[in-house]
Amino acid sequence: MSKPPQLEQFSASFVSEQDRLLLRVRSSDDAEYRFWITRRYLALLWPMLMKMADAFSSRKAPGDPLTRNTLAELAHGEAVSKADFGSAYQDGSLFPLGEEPILLARITVKPLEGNTQTLTLLPQQGQGINLELDEKLVHVLARLLQEAAAAAEWGLSLRVAAGTATMPETTDPTGPRLLH
């Protein structure tokens, strides 16, 4: 029986013409999946990623939120320091969902099984992707999204903290926006 394809590479970048982040995921079978992430979607996705980080940390320090938070920050730092952010993203040659990016609208997380959790990214209708993420990949994906969101200047404060179940804070140095 053959092994299912493994995640090989992520890429997240800001596309100013779309005012969206482009998330690209390539697997070991050279399949590439492309997704659009809006500011709103990222604000929904971030707490889910932090809950995933918390699930990994809670195995190491059950019942102690302060220790879990510290462990999540340490795991983030270690994963980011060991990840290869310098290599260029290698385009895939197969596009199971098409070459045009899919606008994401829904998210689900399947709880920890063994050393991975499943993050499912879905459009409003149609197919999406199931990402089997270990602790390192959760933090690498989080870092890529942090950097892309900073480039977008969306004013989201995407902090790494275990148990962060709230929406990211907005950071607007010019003060609150007033709409009328």
Image (cartoon, rainbow, N blue to C red):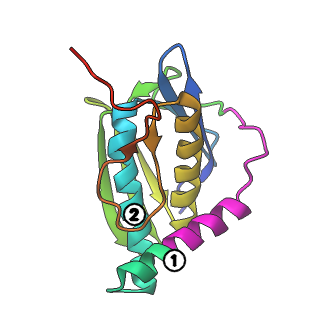
User: What amino acid type is highlighted by mark number 2?
Assistant: Met
Q: Residue at x 51, y 77 (%)?
A: 71
Q: Is residue 63 above or below residue 123?
A: below
The quarter of the picture where residue 68 lies is: bottom left
User: What amino acid type is highlighted by mark number 1?
Assistant: Leu
Sequence order check, earlier mark of 1 and 2: 2
Residue 165 as seen in the image, left or right of residue 80? left
* Cα separation between marks 1 and 2: 13 Å
Q: Is residue 4 above or below residue 100?
A: below
Please tell me the numbered disc located at residue 71: 1
| Nearest to viewer (mark 1 / mark 2) | 1
For the C terminus, give its image quadrant: top left
Task: Estimate the x, y position of residue 25 in percent, counting from the top left.
Answer: 56, 41
Q: Is residue 109 above or below residue 57?
A: above
Please tell me the numbered disc located at residue 52: 2
Q: Residue at x 32, y 26 (%)?
A: 177
Q: Residue at x 30, y 33 (%)?
A: 105
Nearest the viewer among 157 and 128 is 157
